[in-house]
Amino acid sequence: MPKSFRSLARVAGLCLSSLAVAAADGPWWPAFHGPQRDNLVRETGLLKQWPRQGPRLIWKFPGCGRGYAAVSAAGGLLYTSGDFGDEERVLALDVDGRLRWQAPNGKAWRGAQPGSRTTPTYDDGLVYHLGPHGDLAAFEAATGRRVWAVNIRETFSARLGLWGYTENLMVDGDRVLCMPGGAEGRVVALDKKSGRTLWANTEITDLNAYSSPIVAEHNGVRQYIALARTTVLGVEVQTGKLLWSHPHESFCDQNVTSPIYRAGQVFVSSGHRAGARVVRLSADPVRAQQVWHGVQLDNCHGGVVLLDGYLYGSGCRLYNKGLLCVEFATGKVQYRAEAIGKVSLTWADGLLYCLDNDGEMLLVKATPQAATVISRFKFPRNDSEHTLTHPVVCGGRLYLRHLSDLCAYDIQAR
């Protein structure tokens, strides 16, 4: 068994209950970047090479509304969001691409880069969604009936950033965790059944950015780890106490990429030569000490994955164009595959799935020595806007979205 599969098998043991749900109810990808929020797909049996014209298109749904949200999957349904005129909506489709329900959630985003931002998060029969103006709502996953709603910008006295709210919500235990960035709540926990505030951290001085958080356990303490406007920080999930923070400032107000936690160390990255860094967390009291910083892996918003001690992600097109491989422990750049360009990505069954800004989908074999494109095809579109939504692999299918169009491709090996 290859080393990458052995490593993932150890992690997969943490989510056996989730996999049992998946087996019973169909595809399981309940949140942005999956059940572990690491963007690593555990399923196997996928095509190792695509036909020249690309994998078979199963269906196309053209009614998502304008947006950049990806899809989540649970209970036999797919969830996404989009803007329809002045209204933002959450949508549910069945696995055959038929609309099952749609529900409004606040105003559409008409500021910089107009369109929906966030992928709905599924947990325990409810779907949670954060709109660009701070409308956080919970819906019945099967019907779309709204259960509760809170505007986190108003409730916690926050101001909208240039790009609006773009955080993909984290549900951990009985808590919905998020970063309003307000004077009355920088990071908060809401009861997932009622929306009631469980705690609100006001000691943090930094503002929210546009990144989506992770939750990790360090020395027995569960932490909400987020990339904020000028820092990366960790907050105790149980109490809301700030545990640590470390400077990480973007030059263009674009701290977007999710952090990665591994064995007491945290990786973050930002575009436009702000670059990447890894910090090491100490024991109690928790402090963050920088391990390395480099400007080459300046990932803007396409995502980075960690595989067997190596980071894979695109540099910013303006400066470090291409897919980079960087050693997690040292920051050493192994190579830059310039031909692959600036991509949003995910990893499944030993391969990277990379969607570039121009709508080309690439299947890539990436190792610490080289990145090789195995197959490619053009995602159909009728405009020249950048294709920015992250690809999703789930249930033997590849889901690609561009603005209002969502396509499902058959990538299962037979």
Image (tube, helix red, strand yellow):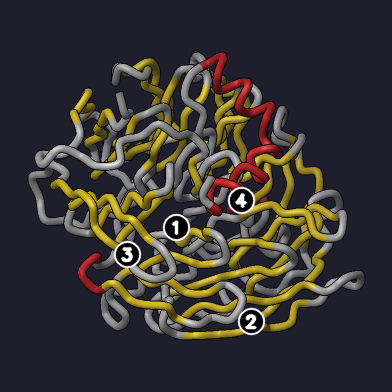
The answer for how far apart the CA atoms under marks 3 and 2 are is 32 Å
| Sequence order check, earlier mark of 1 and 3 | 1
What percent of the width, then of the height, locates residue 387? 24, 53
Examine the image and state in which quarter residue 93 appears.
Answer: top left
Examine the image and state in which quarter residue 55 appears.
Answer: top left
| Residue 363 in view, yes or no | yes
Mark 4 residue element? helix
Q: Which residue is under mark 4?
A: 7
Residue at (81% x, 57% y) in the render: 236
The answer for how far apart the CA atoms under marks 1 and 3 are is 35 Å
Classify 349 as above or below 233: above
Left or right of 239, for residue 192: left
Q: Which residue is under mark 2?
A: 247
What percent of the width, then of the height, locates residue 163? 41, 62
Classify 347 as above or below 401: below
Mark 1 residue element? loop
Q: Residues within 10 Å of mark 3 (few under 14, many from 20)?
A: many
Name the kind of residue labelled 4 in the image. Ser
Q: Nearer the viewer, mark 1 or mark 4?
A: 4
Name the kind of residue labelled 3 in the image. Ala
Q: Which mark is residue 371?
A: 3
Name the kind of residue labelled 2 in the image. Pro
The answer for how far apart the CA atoms under marks 2 and 1 are is 22 Å
Tag 3–tag 2 contact (CB < 8 Å): no
Q: Which residue is under mark 1?
A: 164
Q: Residues within 10 Å of mark 2 (few under 14, many from 20)?
A: some
Left or right of 214, for residue 337: left
What percent of the width, then of the height, locates residue 392? 38, 40
Quarter of the figure that contains the N terminus: top right
Residue at (23% x, 38% y) in the render: 404
